Amino acid sequence: MAEYTPVPEFAKGPDIPDSGYLVTELGGGAYGISSGMVNTMFLVTKRGVVVVDAPPDLDERLLAGIEEVTSNPITHLIYSHAHADHIGSAHLLVRNGLKIIAHEATAEFIQESHDDHRPLPNETFSGTRTELKIDGELLVLEYKGDWHQPGNLFIHLPEQRILTAIDSFTVKNAPFFRLLFAPHVPAYFTAMDDMLEYDFDTVVSGHMSLFGTPEDVATNREYIQDLRTSAAEALGEVDLRQAAADAGVPSDNRQAQLKVWMDAVVARAAEHMPESWDQRLGGNDIFLADNLNAVAWSVFID
Ligand SMILES: [Zn+2]
């Protein structure tokens, strides 16, 4: 088996009970809920419940978690974005009168997916912003760029001082894989700045069991800036043809040359990364090469 750096205690989060879920009070009627692998939040209003997403890794346990704190019916479901790992159990929430709200770009993705576990939203908005007033509670939905998937939302609850930004980063941990599959890396960098413009105390970011703070967003921003600095340095040092010749790649195999070169850039960039990140974030060893690959290509082509 591969050897991994032990996960630091601060990055682990609370244990998940045998029920398979953990509900965390976030204040002002808002609650976080986690399966350990995936998390989301819901808001209990006077007459109902507003839920963000319905992840399959929580499945029916999302309903059990909500019932643990209220007998109010689920009146609104907001899709943060269209990915199946976050909304693929939405069919379990469907009942008469349920409002499913999303950006119209998210609705288009769902339409194309032909997945009956992801019912189409019945209320969409276009543009960059909409405000929902539900039972006196304010939720601000903003689409500020394609940092994860077209249609992805920041969901701000100003009164509760909560920012829900699903798949923006991983609290106390390095980003999964290639900056959580950011389709446009510069937009991912901008998203961290945008998040820090909001007034909030708690951020709900979609994976693992921890809910974060503005400091956690700032830490992720510092981490990705270090990725970019290290990648830029390595790109200046590693020559494509030299790297290919050193690795014995035949001169007529240009695809192998490219692959060997980028692998060498990533390896060199990893040497430039401050070693302290292993103590500051969990999973740095696991995702460093993937993240550096995404950032190095972006520095090279964007
Ligand atoms: Zn996603």
Image (cartoon, rainbow, N blue to C red):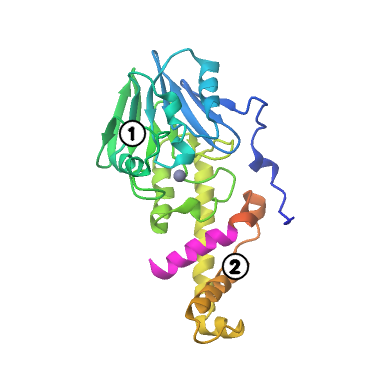
Residue 68, percent from left and from top:
55, 17
Q: Along the line of sight, which residue is nearer the eye, 81 or 239? A: 81
Q: Is residue 212 above or below residue 149?
A: above
Q: Which mark is residue 120?
A: 1
Residue 249, percent from left and from top:
57, 83
Does the beta carbon at disc 1 come under 8 Å from ligand 1? no
Highlighted magenta segment, given as a residue range = 288-302
Q: Secondary structure at mark 1?
A: loop
Mark 2 = which residue? 272
Residue 73, percent from left and from top:
42, 15
Decide: few, some or many residues near mark 2? Use Cα within 10 Å; few <14, some 14-19, many ≥20. some
105 within the magenta span = no
**Quadrant in which residue 223 is drawn:** bottom right
Residue 62, percent from left and from top:
52, 26
Q: Which mark is residue 41?
A: none
Q: Amino acid at mark 1?
A: Leu
Spatial CA distance of label 1 from label 2 is 46 Å
Q: Is residue 89 above or below residue 186?
A: above
The answer to whether the residue labelled 1 contacts the one labelled 2, judged by CB atoms less than 8 Å apart, is no
**Quadrant in which residue 216 is drawn:** top right
Image side of residue 280 versus residue 140, left or right:
right
- Please report the residue visible at 59 percent of the width from the left and 35 percent of the height from the top: 209
Q: State which quarter of the image contains the N terminus.
A: bottom right
300 within the magenta span = yes
Q: Amino acid at mark 2?
A: His
